[in-house]
Each structure stands twice: as C-alpha cells, then as structure tokens.
Amino acid sequence: MLSGQLPKTVDPRKLARQGLQFEGSLALKQFNRLVASLADDQGEVKVFLHFYMSEDHRVVLQGYVEANLKMICQRCLDVAELPVRSDLNLMGVLTDEQARSLPEGYEPLMLIDEPMELVPLLEEELLLSLPIVAYHPPEACQVQQSFTTESDEEAEAFAAQAEEEEKRRNPFSVLASLKTDATEPK
C-alpha cells in the first residue's frame, strides 16, 4: 500500500494489473466545484483506493473518499460541519453498452487511453454524496433548540389561540349568519 502523497493522474488498467492500493489526503482547495457549495475551502479529503482485476479480468476500483465539509445550515444559517463519505465500487468499461451490463453493485468507470486525473473523479463522488439540504444535527442547531423548548401545554395553548383567531377572521362567517336568517320563519 502506498501512503501519503496521492498521484495526480492514474492509469486504472496498469494499477489494477499491479493490484496497487493508495491511501492519503488531498487539500480541499483542489476541489473547485465542490468548494463552490461550501462555506469555506479549509480542510482535507481523505482517500483510500484499491485497484485490482476481477475474476473475469475487468478493472475494478474500490475504496472511499471522505471529508468533513462546512456548509450553511438551512435552519439557523450558521456554519455546520458535516461528515460526507462516498464508497467507491467502480468497474472499468469501454462502451456505453458495457456500462449498462455491469454486475449489480458496480458503477461504470470509463477507461480512456491516457491516464485520468484523480481529483475530478473523487470530486464527482463527493458532489453526489452531498446532502440536498444541509442541517446541523437537531441537538446542535440553535433554531431547532428554540422551537423545542416550549412545553406541550404552551404548544396546545398556542394552537387553540390560532384556531380561535382563524374563526374570527373567516370572511365567510357572514354568509353563515345570512343562511340562518333565510331559514327562520317570518
């Protein structure tokens, strides 16, 4: 296993024939598209990659990419540090037809003649793993705590008050009184 500095480019075929593994980290600043979705670009991305040949002699890349990413919490609008991890289970393909017929559990890794850049591949995996909407965990979010501190009695009283106010403001309540006036005998 090679630890430390990760290569800038990889040749999946060559690495799979050699059965190589890589473990290391990359500066978050290198992931331009990912950083555009974050609150800042400080930190690092941890990577583990294992290239090997499958039983049917196909290139396989397994591993993971993970990072603690700072995003804006959509409840309190404060910075939330969220752990994001993407497990890689890729199999090399040359055509779209091969990609459609991959064994279950594998995603396609399009093999090209020249070495592929590692950062865009890893960045794509992290982007796909980002939450749709970022939130602190409920116990850590300031807004969530302020809403959950009310007692059940206070919440019920507030709901009853809102319902009573709605009845008073109903513009059709006048029609109800006209209906009762029309049905009374004269």
Image (spheres, helix red, strand yellow):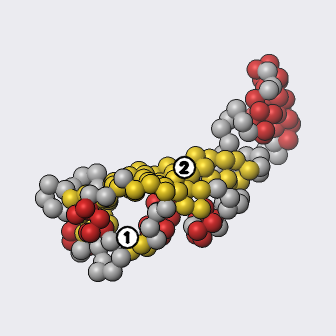
Q: Is 100 located above or below residue 181 in the figure? A: below
Q: Is 115 located above or below residue 38 in the figure? A: below
Tell me residue 161's x, y (percent). 84, 29
- Occupied quadrant, residue 138: top right
Residue sitting nearer the eye, 26 or 185: 26
User: What's the residue at 19%, 56% (across, down)?
Assistant: 54
User: What's the residue at 72%, 36% (across, down)?
Assistant: 140
Q: Secondary structure at mark 1?
A: strand
Q: On the rendered image, what quadrant is the C terminus found in?
A: top right
Q: Residues within 10 Å of mark 2 (few under 14, many from 20)?
A: some
Tell me residue 49's x, y (percent). 38, 56
Tag of residue 84? 2
User: What's the residue at 63%, 66% (across, down)?
Assistant: 29
Q: Is 127 located above or below residue 186 in the figure? A: below
Residue found at the far bottom of this picture: 113
Residue type pointed to by label 1: Val
Residue sitting nearer the eye, 68 or 38: 68
Residue found at the far top of this picture: 153
Residue sitting nearer the eye, 72 or 88: 88
Tell me residue 52's x, y (percent). 25, 57
Q: Secondary structure at mark 2?
A: strand
- Occupied quadrant, residue 96: bottom left
User: What's the residue at 82%, 23% (across, down)?
Assistant: 154
Residue under circle 1? Answer: 10
Residue sitting nearer the eye, 77 or 152: 77
Residue type pointed to by label 2: Val
Question: Do callouts 1 and 2 mark residues in contact (Cβ within 8 Å)?
Answer: no
Tag of residue 40? none
